[in-house]
Image (cartoon, rainbow, N blue to C red):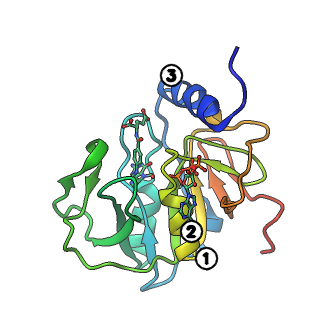
Amino acid sequence: MTGSSKPDLRARLRAARRAYAPVAILVPDSFRARLSPRLIIASYIPVGSEADPAPFAQAATAAGCRIALPHVVDHATPLRFLAWATGAALVTGPFGLRQPAADAPELAPDIILTPLVGFDRRGARLGQGAGHYDRAFLAYPDAWRVGVAFAGQEVELLPIDAWDMPLHAIATDKEWIVPRWTVS
Ligand SMILES: Nc1nc2c(c(=O)[nH]1)N(C=O)[C@@H](CNc1ccc(C(=O)N[C@@H](CCC(=O)O)C(=O)O)cc1)CN2
Ligand SMILES: Nc1ncnc2c1ncn2[C@@H]1O[C@H](COP(=O)(O)OP(=O)(O)OP(=O)(O)O)[C@@H](O)[C@H]1O
């Protein structure tokens, strides 16, 4: 029997995500309402069975925002958010990730669209386990942290570690979840 440690949950939730038929995640009005020209939105290019945040990036571009994508080199080095013009060439990095070239300009995001392995209704999040997003959230504490996931990736209560920063909102194919800890 598996327990509920982060590694056990990660394995279970990755399997659940792989079994989920990919569905589009629609952009809610509360996300659009946050967009304004020149804001920097960090999106990501999905790998494997991850939910695709492209509709959010498209809404942001249409609103005059700039898009950045995460760029990683290895587990130890903090990720950087690098400028990306929709459709511009990407380079294949570690784990098969499609990323901007390493010399693209680094941008400070106002909104961080975050890939999720799992989440709970309090806004707790499970990622790849390398701490890349944990460290990015610490580096940009004022950014709006929006998780993107399929509804089937929800668990009742995730374990929370000292370094975990909660999500402000979670976009799923079924609903837009605003955890109760948020003020606005
Ligand atoms: N699309 C996407 N981009 C992203 C992330 C992500 O989770 N998804 N990241 C989030 O931090 C960063 C890349 N960091 C990563 C760190 C570890 C692993 C990793 O250990 N992958 C496993 C396989 C995962 C699976 O089976 O689903 C591996 O290759 O062994 C992947 C990405 C930045 N860019
Ligand atoms: N601010 C930080 N500085 C250095 N290491 C950190 C920081 N935050 C988290 N870590 C490390 O990163 C790892 C993150 O583990 P955890 O299982 O919480 O990952 P996760 O939140 O699922 O992953 P990710 O943030 O990559 O999506 C831990 O080993 C932790 O020690």
Asked if the residues shown at circle 2 and circle 1 are in contact, with their CB atoms under 8 angstroms apart, the answer is: yes
Q: In this view, does 105 lie to the left or right of 8?
A: left
Instruction: Return the residue found at the far front.
Output: 76
Among numbered discs 3 and 1, the one appearing first in the sequence: 3
Instruction: Name which residue type carries label 3.
Output: Ala
* Residue lying farthest to the top in this orientation: 1
> What amino acid does circle 1 point to?
Pro
- Density class for disc 1 (Cα within 10 Å; few <14, some 14-19, many ≥20) is few
Residue 141: which disc? Answer: 1
Q: Do the residues labelled 3 and 2 touch (CB within 8 Å)?
A: no
- Which residue is rendered at x = 67% and y = 63% of the image? 165
From the top left corner, tell me how far across and down residue 86 is, in percent.
Answer: 27, 65
Does label 2 point to a residue whose CB lies under 8 Å from ligand 2? yes
Point out the image quarter for the N terminus: top right
Residue sitting at x 35%, y 52%: 45
Residue 87 image offset from top left, x and y in percent: 21, 61
Check contact, mark 3 vs mark 1: CB within 8 A.
no
The residue located at (54%, 77%) in the rendering is 140
Q: Which residue carries the number 3 mark? A: 19
Q: Is residue 42 above or below residue 72?
A: below
Eye-nearest disc, 3 or 2: 2
Kind of residue indicated by mark 2: Phe
